[in-house]
Amino acid sequence: MKICLLTANFPPEAVGGTEQVVTALLRAFVAAGHEVAVVSGSDVPHAGVDRIDDVHEGVAVTRLPKKPDEHDRHGYVRPRLLALVRERLAALRPDVVHVHSFAGLGLGVTALCRDLAIPVVVTFHDLWVTCARFFRIPAGGVRCPDGADRAPCVTCVNDALQTDAAFVERALAERDRLLRDELAAATACTAPSRTAADFVRRCAPFDRDVEVIPHGLLRPVPAEHRARPPATGEPLRVGTFGGLVPQKGLRELVDACRGLACELHLYGPFHDPAFAADLRERAAQRGLTMVEHGRFGPDDRHPARDLHLAVFPSKCQETYGLVVDEALARGVPVVCSDSGALAERAMAPGVVVTPLDKLANVLAELVASPQRLAALRQAIPAALPTIDDSARRHLDLYASLT
């Protein structure tokens, strides 16, 4: 089968959650004997070249840089980019196109595929379909609507734009119209969690089936990479890993660790030096030992191998939670917030889900109870669902459409 994956960006330029999932799926498809190509947007500014062709992990990748007037603030349909996508798909003639993000290339892709008689699958990796600001973290003193009401969205979006509210209202209405047309032209849709699927159903709104296919663990983890339990008298290492930004609840994590007999370990890049400085000062004021390990890559020793407890107190409306799988696969118990799809982990062995306002109590109980922490560790299953399971389900879906 010939498969074309469309995404907003792709490694090595970007290695966020969606890019990691797409790359892992790509590997699984190739390993199963399928022919794969990628068409990707790019955050590298357009420099006179419309199309950049390269090869990543043996797969042909076409990158389409945007011009300055081809970003969301200028509209969601980008005719020049759509023409380039059409040209590439006409040359590839794939059996199926799988759209993993509209954010880079803009809207109109599914209708284009329909015109070319190519089945198209859309996966809702994130909340861009339901949120013009992407993450459903409201600004302007409003609450995100649990439906298609856009009145709060006007205030939230205008908090960033500071323009005429009536203009924002019209722009959001046009965005909704375009998105409804886009999703109506999709042959099938999937999401990595019930939460992500429900967000789209309620907030787009979207009344067709969305098949829930969890990502699972993206890379195999050798048994020797499982973390060791804390030794007698050893400081308990509590930690988190990923992008170190306020939206991931790091201030709340520092506050929750205050007065506990533990060290706090942070793995990943700070994207804002001011936030990093604020967090260091916050930890010092609370007498907390906070250790920063910096950026890590796929070939580095995984952070979870050196932790006794992983904590992910995200404030974002998460649509899956790859980091939870990564910690569990290394035998590390997890505490996470109940934001978005993280709430679905409440029944997962080895995981404690908590509202953020209860985080301090939950951590205090675990740090003070080696027995409970050991019980959580022992409950973690020896094997977890993997990206290979996701790939098989997607291949079955593709086959049903062709």
Image (cartoon, helix red, strand yellow):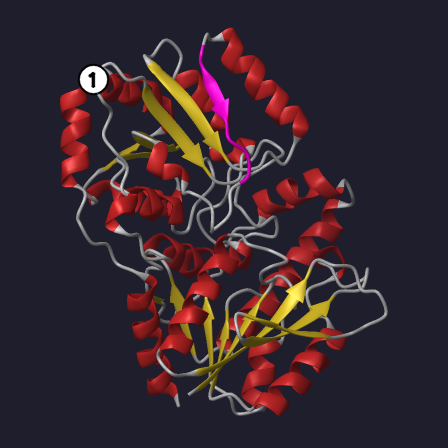
Name the residue beneath numbered marker 1.
Answer: 232
Three-letter amino acid code at the position of disc 1: Thr
Q: Quadrant of the N terminus?
A: bottom left
Residues rendered magenta in the picture: 288-295
Q: Is residue 346 left or right of residue 243?
A: left
Q: Residue furthest right?
A: 48
> Is any atom of residue 335 visible in this view?
yes
Towards the viewer: 112 or 2: 2
Query: Residue 61's image quarter?
Result: bottom right
* Above-or-below relation of 137 to 103: above
- For the C terminus, the quadrant is bottom left
Q: Position of residue 145 (x, y in %)?
A: 49, 45
Give 164 or 220, whichever is nearer the viewer.
Answer: 220
Task: Give the structural element (helix, strand or loop) at label 1.
Answer: loop
The x and y percentages for residue 329 are 28, 47
Q: Residue at x 38, y 82 (%)?
A: 398
* On screen, residue 373 above or below 301: above
Residue closest to the eye, 261 or 210: 261
Q: In the rendered view, would you say 223 is above or below 253?
A: below
SS assignment for the magenta stretch, majority? loop
Residue at 63% across, 75% down: 108
- What x and y, as percent, mark residue 370? 18, 21
Q: Is residue 38 left or right of residue 338?
A: right
Report the side of 82 relative to 50 (left or right): left
- Residue density around tag 1, few if under 14, some if 14–19, many if 20 or more, within 10 Å: few
Residue in view at x 54 percent, y 76 percent: 59
Count of numbered tags? 1
Describe residue 165's horizontal placement relative to residue 322 as left or right: right
Name the outermost residue toward the front.
Answer: 224
Residue 136's x, y, as percent? 52, 45
Find out whether residue 96 is within the magenta segment: no
